[in-house]
Amino acid sequence: MKSSKKKKKSKNNTDTPNLYKGRLDVTRSGMGFVIVEGRDQDVLVRPADFNTALHGDTVQVRILSSGGRSGRSQGEVTEVVDRKQMEFLGHIEISQSFAFFIAGTDKPMPDIYVPLTQLNGAVNNDKVIVRIVEWEKNKKPQGTVVQVMDQSDENDQAMRGILLENGFPLFFPENVLEDSGRLPDLIPAAEIAKRKDIRDILTFTIDPVDAKDFDDAISIRTLDNGQLEIGIHIADVSYYVEPETALDKEAYTRATSVYLPDRVNPMLPERISNELCSLRPHEDKLTFSAIFRMNAKGEIKDAWLGRTVIHSDHRFTYEEVQEIIEQQTGLYQAEIATLNELAQRFRKQRFKKGAINFSSTEVRFKLDSKGKPIGIMVKESKESHNWLRNSCCWPTVPLPKPSARSR
């Protein structure tokens, strides 16, 4: 029995060590190298052995020969585990009976065959974005034109190219857009009844002047006992994106929104990120909130954490709030002055206790009417930037467990 088990273990060892998972890196010459975590040397793969893999793909590679004196093994791709990208920017060449797409990349890749029925309005030599829809081994990949680019807008082409080359998808799948489109505008009364309702409390957002969505807000009021109640609120995306739905899976795949000088490539469709979960003024919104009660000295007397419904009274920019602070006049001046005084006090206390100031110089790109960067401006960080954006401005206290029904 012992001898039999040893033979079985030995057989497995000769089968499995030859297979590894890693990322394919293709050089400009066309040679590929699979970078395997934990291996000292990557695995050389010749173009004939890519098996439909492209630069940046996660692949499974089989070792065909040992490294010998060079220390580098040679192998072949047996499976594409995960594609880095399926959409590419380039130009289309159309003949009488078919079309081919040539990607505008410095990494060698095969031309993509495009049936004439899948041109979607593209004409010969148009700059287009093509999505691979089918690719059989030893055949050309087949694709479809998903967008025809404006030839004169070089900036738009450059921005989209950056996103695609780094594996960020530009378009949401149809089922994801359909799911987001079905989400209702109105919040059901039954859902509001489950939450702390603070719609009658002064609430506003503070964001950059060019912000497209407003994720967080701040509220303030004075209680009958003279204490201050300050709330920090963030959009409750979980109400709209339920686990294991198409929306949830797409958000998990994208992982984050990507910010470029002139645009945002969102993690969630604009229906959610810019509408339902954007804390726009004069609209009821669902949020998660941390609400503190404190005296005029900023000493915390109570804290609450849970689900809420809010109604923003105004959308401020950082510059507008800073002007109110410096000029001591303007909309909600008294409340802004109070918040600024408390934020500075908490910030000072945190630094005394050893907190690190992670603030750094930031730049903003100056864009022309077409979104093309024409200059760079240094963003000066002032008091107004340190309220919602910088968490070290607010107190650190033990918080209760979240509760949707806590009052």
Image (cartoon, rainbow, N blue to C red):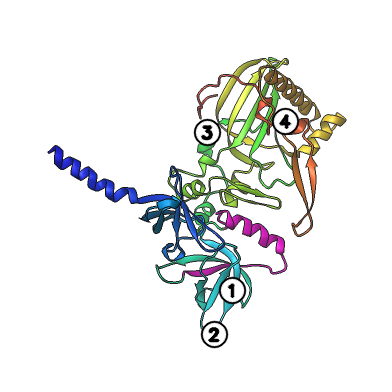
Badge 1 element: strand
Residue highlighted by disc 4: 386
Is disc 3 surrounded by few (<14), some (14 to 19) or many (20+) residues within 10 Å? few
x%, y% of residue 376? Answer: 79, 48
Q: Earlier in the sequence, mark 1 or mark 3?
A: 1
Amino acid beneath label 4: Asn
Give the magenta-colored segment's residue range: 141-170
Residue highlighted by disc 1: 92
What is the distance, in whole Å, between disc 3 and disc 4 at their CAs?
33 Å
What is the distance, in whole Å, between disc 2 and disc 1 at their CAs?
13 Å
Magenta stretch: includes residue 21: no
Residue depicted at x 79% and y 42%:
378
User: Which numbered mark, 2 or 3, is in the foreground of this view?
Assistant: 2
What is the distance, in whole Å, between disc 2 and disc 3 at their CAs?
64 Å
User: Which numbered mark, 1 or 3, is in the foreground of this view?
Assistant: 1
Amino acid beneath label 1: Ile
Amino acid beneath label 3: Ala
User: Which numbered mark, 3 or 4, is in the foreground of this view?
Assistant: 4
Amino acid beneath label 2: Gln
Badge 3 element: helix
Residue furthest to the front = 69
Q: Is residue 102 above or below residue 196?
A: below
What is the distance, in whole Å, between disc 4 and disc 2 at their CAs?
62 Å
Residue highlighted by disc 3: 193
